[in-house]
Amino acid sequence: QNLSNEAYRIQPAQYAAKVDQMIADHTVRQEGAFPVVHPPPGSDVYLMGRVYMWWPMLELEKGQSYRLHLSSIDLQHGFSLQPLNINIQVHPGYEMVVNVTPTTSGTFGIVCNEYCGFGHHTMTGRIYVVDRT
């Protein structure tokens, strides 16, 4: 099920610090309580699963490549990118890395597809892909 051929052991607090640094460096706007982060093309992008959200929202550029890092800081979660049907199991203590190059602009939803507790059905996130050409 996992697409990544690159994975590392990591402490959840260390991963959370990477996410926080990316948010501090690259936030372009807020959507409610959620920061929307636009990291530079070619960079490492960090997305964190935690009860019950995917954090932060991402804005990526069409046709540009990124190294998408996924981890959880609490429970096992599922990263399911819709409508593309990309599914990755995300475990605390492991950092999965997936190379991505978005080919279509639009808004893509992330849902958790591994039951993670009472609020599982509300665990969603978002990736925006913008066309800068």
Image (cartoon, grey):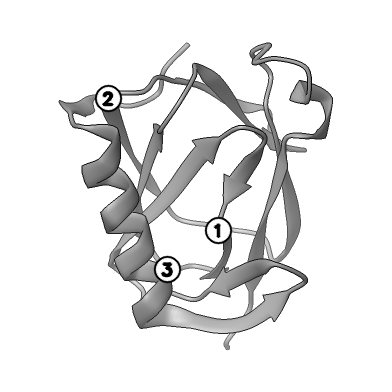
Residue occupying the point 54% across, 35% down = 50
Residue occupying the point 30% across, 68% down = 21
Q: Earlier in the sequence, mark 2 or mark 1?
A: 1
Q: Of circles 3 and 2, which is in front?
A: 2
- The quarter of the rendered structure image containing the C terminus is bottom right
What residue would you read off at disc 3?
A: 64
What residue would you read off at disc 1?
A: 56
Q: Earlier in the sequence, mark 3 or mark 1?
A: 1
Q: Earlier in the sequence, mark 3 or mark 2?
A: 3
Residue occupying the point 74% across, 38% down = 82
Q: What numbered label is drawn on residue 94?
A: 2
Q: Say if 54 sits above or below 34 in the image.
A: above
- Amino acid type for the residue under numbered disc 1: Pro
**In the picture provided, is 111 more to the left or to the right than 67?**
right
Asked if the residue under mark 1 is in contact with the one under mark 2, i.e. CB atoms within 8 Å, the reply is no
- Quadrant for residue 121, please give it: top right
